[in-house]
Image: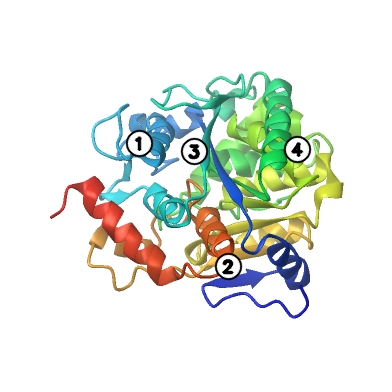
């Protein structure tokens, strides 16, 4: 589509030509959303994850997010996943985008300890161990291969595929895998808190690599081995879905620095899909002073653009949502990718204002506000 322009609700970082080419091919077309839920016991290490009110509750967050997306309520726990201080899960924004657009959605179980009370595709994975063991994920090849098959299946039925994740502790595992692959030489990953525990994450990753007997860059050509040693079960499932789908249809990788590890793995295993997928995320992540998504993507590939949604909660009547503007949460449960996908599928008719209004409606209902 010559001269195609993105609406003001979306912005681009990176290769604008590729970004516009992909979007023009799926503009107004039919997409599907997947969310891969998984656990890693790394999230229970105190201080690692704020994706739950306590370290123990982080194990319930992926299942609860899946339940909110599918049924609008949680069954596996009381209340909704919140970060300390009462800030709600980004699943509220994801649900708003999916509701407005009527994009169908599926849950993928990459490897959960707490199983969500919803239908899901099972990839044959188990809960990941703490990365400091050096042996964190079992069945990596099986999870990847089943993910690949699922990606192929979805590409037969839809014009584009959105992948996403809910896996507490996943920025720490992402850092470990990208260090093992040599993609990153410094800690650039984000956190669901404005006080990103960078020193703790870097120390854990150093311990993990030592336990695995891996030096940074040793596994540059073997992302699945890197995941087996220091990753989490969400990664091989999403690498598989991305690679299986993107050979046929465009893919939106909905997520932040966690999914950078997925992108790095996919680019290494199937370089031919570059040019047929982009990262879909939020302006909160792109503007985060404590991480650097731009620098991470530059180190993975200059030809994987980032398209981000300009949703703004500054004027929200709810403090829990205003907190996104203060550096909390930023991304997760594919909230950026689902929002970008909703805008694209609606040919731009869905705006940031529509998304914000729908989030308020969903948030009021979930929180029991009048």
SS of the residue under disc 4? helix
Quadrant in which the C terminus is drawn: bottom left
The answer, for residue 222, to whether it is visible in the render is: yes
Sequence-first tag of 2 and 3: 3
Which numbered disc, 4 or 1, marks the residue closer to the eye? Answer: 1
Q: Which residue occupies the extreme right position in the image? A: 272
For label 4, the residue is: 244
Residue under label 3:
169
Disc 1 secondary structure class = helix
Q: Nearer the viewer, mark 2 or mark 3?
A: 2
The residue to which callout 1 is attached is 71
Which percent across, then down, holds residue 340?
Answer: 55, 61
Above or below, 3 relative to 271 = below
Write down the residue under mark 2. 347
Quarter holding residue 262: top right
Q: Quadrant of residue 15?
A: bottom right
């Amino acid at each position: 589509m010559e001269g195609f322009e993105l609406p003001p609700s979306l912005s681009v970082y990176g290769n604008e030509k590729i970004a516009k080419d992909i979007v023009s091919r799926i503009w107004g077309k039919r997409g599907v959303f997947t969310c891969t839920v998984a656990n890693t016991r790394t999230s229970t290490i105190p201080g690692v994850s704020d994706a739950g009110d306590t370290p123990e509750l982080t194990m319930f967050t992926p299942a609860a997010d899946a339940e909110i997306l599918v049924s609008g309520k949680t069954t596996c726990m009381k209340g909704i996943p919140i970060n300390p201080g009462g800030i709600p899960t980004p699943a509220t924004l994801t649900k708003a985008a999916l509701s407005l657009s009527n994009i169908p959605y599926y849950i993928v179980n990459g490897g959960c300890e707490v199983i969500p009370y919803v239908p899901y595709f099972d990839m044959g994975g188990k809960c990941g161990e703490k990365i400091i063991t050096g042996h964190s994920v079992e069945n990596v090849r099986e999870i990847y291969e089943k993910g690949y098959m699922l990606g192929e299946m979805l590409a037969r039925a839809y014009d584009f595929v959105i992948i996403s994740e809910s896996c507490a502790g996943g920025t720490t595992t992402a850092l470990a895998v990208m260090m093992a692959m040599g993609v990153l030489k410094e800690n650039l990953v984000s956190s669901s808190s404005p006080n990103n525990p960078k020193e703790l994450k870097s120390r854990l990753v150093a311990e993990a690599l030592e336990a695995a007997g891996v030096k940074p860059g040793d596994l540059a050509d073997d992302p699945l081995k890197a995941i087996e040693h220091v990753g989490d079960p969400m990664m091989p499932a999403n690498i598989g879905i991305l690679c299986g789908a993107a050979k046929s249809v465009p893919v939106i990788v909905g997520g932040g620095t966690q999914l950078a590890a997925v992108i790095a793995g996919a680019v290494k295993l199937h370089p031919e899909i570059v040019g047929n997928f982009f990262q879909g995320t939020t302006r909160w992540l792109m503007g985060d002073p404590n991480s650097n998504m731009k620098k991470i993507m530059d180190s993975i590939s200059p030809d994987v653009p980032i398209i981000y949604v300009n949703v703004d909660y500054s004027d929200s009547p709810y403090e829990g949502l205003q907190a996104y503007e203060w550096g909390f949460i930023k991304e997760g449960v594919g909230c950026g990718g689902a929002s970008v996908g909703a805008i694209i599928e609606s040919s731009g008719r869905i705006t940031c204002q529509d998304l914000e209004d729908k989030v308020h409606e969903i948030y009021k209902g979930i929180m029991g506000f009048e």
